Amino acid sequence: MCRFNAASGALEWGTYYGGIGDDRAYSVVCDADGAQYVLGFGSDELDLQGWGTAYFQSFAGVESDPFATPDALIARFDNAQTLIWSTYVGGASGDGFRAAAWDENGNVFVLGSAGSLFPQVNTCGSLVNTQYGGGASDCVLLKFDSTGDLCWSTYAGGIGNDAPSVEGGVAVGNERVYFGANSSSTNFPTLELQGGYYQEDNAGGLDGVLMGFDLSTLSLIWSTYVGGHGAGSDFGNRY
């Protein structure tokens, strides 16, 4: 992780954050206070940092095969680049975070992918899928509040492979939060919104999927495929 001077481009700070295994960062987002959230996955016991009542989990992958069963990882650094909080979130099947966005109240919404046994939490919203849908992975959607407490997480997927692309897509606005990813499933959970774009079925191969949630209740209000008949990824980067 590095910080460069915006005017001169000079390197002001840089650090490793990882252990002896395969640890990767896929994206970094900054909140209004300049804190940075780093998202990715880890495959061994990192130097994790607890923080008050924030969610905290040690490595839950298979110790004998950590490279094949990484856990999703989120780490928060303050604007002085001090590690404030970091934790794994995951089970024993291979999980990772790809993207995040924050709202004006400091809540952080995270998008990733996971196998079975991913933690399901439902204290502030409605779950889309309580069970793993199948395939190589399902999308996972999460909300952390401003103190790092995990108050909502859910699967979103079907019988195929469902996952964000490398960066994934999360956006917050107009009292809604949106997630964008890719899906080869023929039964991804869809929901029509009156007057909104709606494609009920996968058109073939790997289609894009978009989901919208009410920001106050985290209830699903809209979900659709977006794609054609090709086999390639349609979208899922940033929106």
Image (cartoon, helix red, strand yellow):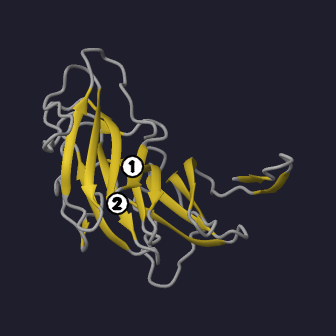
Q: On screen, 65 above or below 36?
A: above
Numbered disc total: 2
Which residue is the extreme one toward the bottom?
A: 52
Q: Mark 1 points at which residue?
A: 112
Q: Can residue 61 be seen in this view?
A: no
Residue at 20%, 47% (x, y): give it.
222
Residue 95: give x, y in percent of width and height: 39, 50
Q: Is residue 196 visible?
A: yes
Which element type, helix, strand or loop, lies under badge 2?
strand
Q: On screen, 8 above or below 44?
A: above
Quarter where residue 159 is shown: top left
Q: Residues within 10 Å of mark 2 (few under 14, many from 20)?
A: many
Residue at 46%, 39% (x, y): give it.
238
Q: How crowded is mark 1: few (under 14 residues within 10 Å), some or many (20 or more)?
A: many
Q: Are marks 2 and 1 in contact (CB under 8 Å)?
A: yes
Residue 214: give x, y in percent of width and height: 25, 59
Residue 18: give x, y in percent of width and height: 63, 56
Residue at 26%, 20% (x, y): give it.
205
Q: On screen, 217 above or below 23?
A: below
Could you say which is closer to the camera, residue 14 or residue 99? 99
Residue 236: give x, y in percent of width and height: 39, 35
Q: Earlier in the sequence, mark 2 or mark 1?
A: 1
Any mark on residue 86, and which? none
Which element type, helix, strand or loop, lies under badge 1?
strand
Residue 18 relative to residue 215: left or right: right
The quarter of the rendered structure image containing the C terminus is top left
Report the Cα–Cα distance between label 2 and label 1: 9 Å
Identity, as a three-letter code, of the amino acid under mark 2: Leu
Could you say which is closer to the camera, residue 38 or residue 17? 38
Q: Name the residue under label 2.
A: 142
Which residue is the extreme one toward the front?
A: 195
Identity, as a three-letter code, of the amino acid under mark 1: Gly
